[in-house]
Image: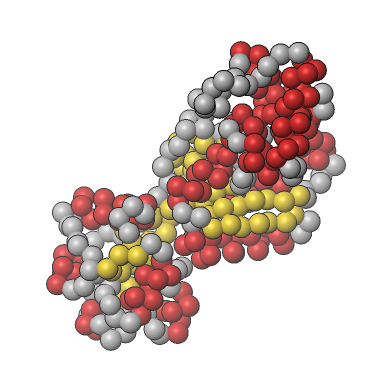
Amino acid sequence: MQVESFRVFRDLVETKSFSRSASLNGITQSAVSQQLRSIEQRLRVPLLERTSKQFALTREGQLLYEASREIISHYQRFQHQLEEMRNIISGTIRLVAVPSVGIHELPPHIKEFLRAFPQVKVQVDYRRSNEVYESVADGDADVGFVAFPAPRKGLKVETFKKDTLHIIASPGHPLAKKGSVALADLAQFKIVSLAPEMPTRQGLDKILAARGLKFQPKMEFDNVETLKSAVEIDAGVAFLPKTVVAAELAAGSLVTVPHGGPEIIRPLGVVSRASRVVSPAVKRFLRALKGSKGNGTADSVGSVAD
């Protein structure tokens, strides 16, 4: 059996999908089925329960899956060690991020990394927070980026940076004319916010609740781009990081409103698989990310490999 057959079978088991396994390995769905039949014929044992309505392995299939994981892990480690011995840092790094982080936070880090390693190609895809975790867990992405990171099974989650949520308003808003406001005074004004299911909204609500505050937004949006547009037309004030509204602040279409009390911190998380060997390029990227100027040391949020 070739290494590729072990990889295809491992991906088939982990994704429980012939089409996903095919996509991950750059082959057709029928090719996955053919490889599965070929392995079964070579080993002379069934690997999948054909009578089960759900995806289920036979005992022999489970044994092969465990062996496949080890074989692929050792083979990848061998490949990566060879690359490091030859000082070869190349290949493709697949990143997935929530838009507010991917669009506004990552570009300087990627630019700095590519300056040092121009042979590496970096792909960035944008997803909702729960989809970022899923993409990394499924192997569709090497590294993920989220706001208010939380531990997830099988994933290594770390805080790589912390930014501050500011009160953002249009220049004509009454709050824009004040030097500083108390957070409690915001109850007198319209507030627009992200949707309740979004981690940044949930994190903000918890921080405010800890300070004895609870606001009922007049409008809620599922992305920061629409949210800041609503603030620009004076639909209300919002809590946003400066990086997201940097262009608008520079153009004067939005302003920050200082407030009393501690800063409202939004941690940003980097997500990777706890059990998967990473390439030298990914390893160097993560190292560069954690060591970037002003980021400090990454804090572990959680890593659950079982």
User: Residue at the location (73% across, 56% down)?
Assistant: 121
Q: Nearer the viewer, residue 15 or 214?
A: 15
How many labels sit on residues?
Answer: 0
Please name whichever residue, 156 or 58, is drawn nearer the observer in this view of the structure. 58
**Quadrant in which residue 74 is drawn:** top right
Q: Name the image quarter holding residue 283.
A: top right
Give the percent coordinates (x, y) of residue 153. 47, 33
* Residue 57 visible at all: no
Q: Residue at x 33, y 73 (%)?
A: 168
Q: Is residue 141 above or below residue 69?
A: below
Residue at image x 63%, y 41%?
20
Q: Residue furthest front?
A: 51
Question: In x, y percent, where is residue 255?
Answer: 35, 79
Q: Is residue 48 above or below residue 177?
A: above
Rendering colour mode: secondary structure
Position in image of residue 185 (x %, y %): 16, 69
In the rendered image, the vertical position of residue 42 relative to residue 174, given as above or below: above
Where is the N terminus found, in terms of image quarters?
top right
Residue 228 on image: x %, y %:
38, 73
Residue at (71% x, 13% y) in the render: 45
Report the side of 156 relative to 230 (left or right). right
Give the image quarter of residue 205.
bottom left
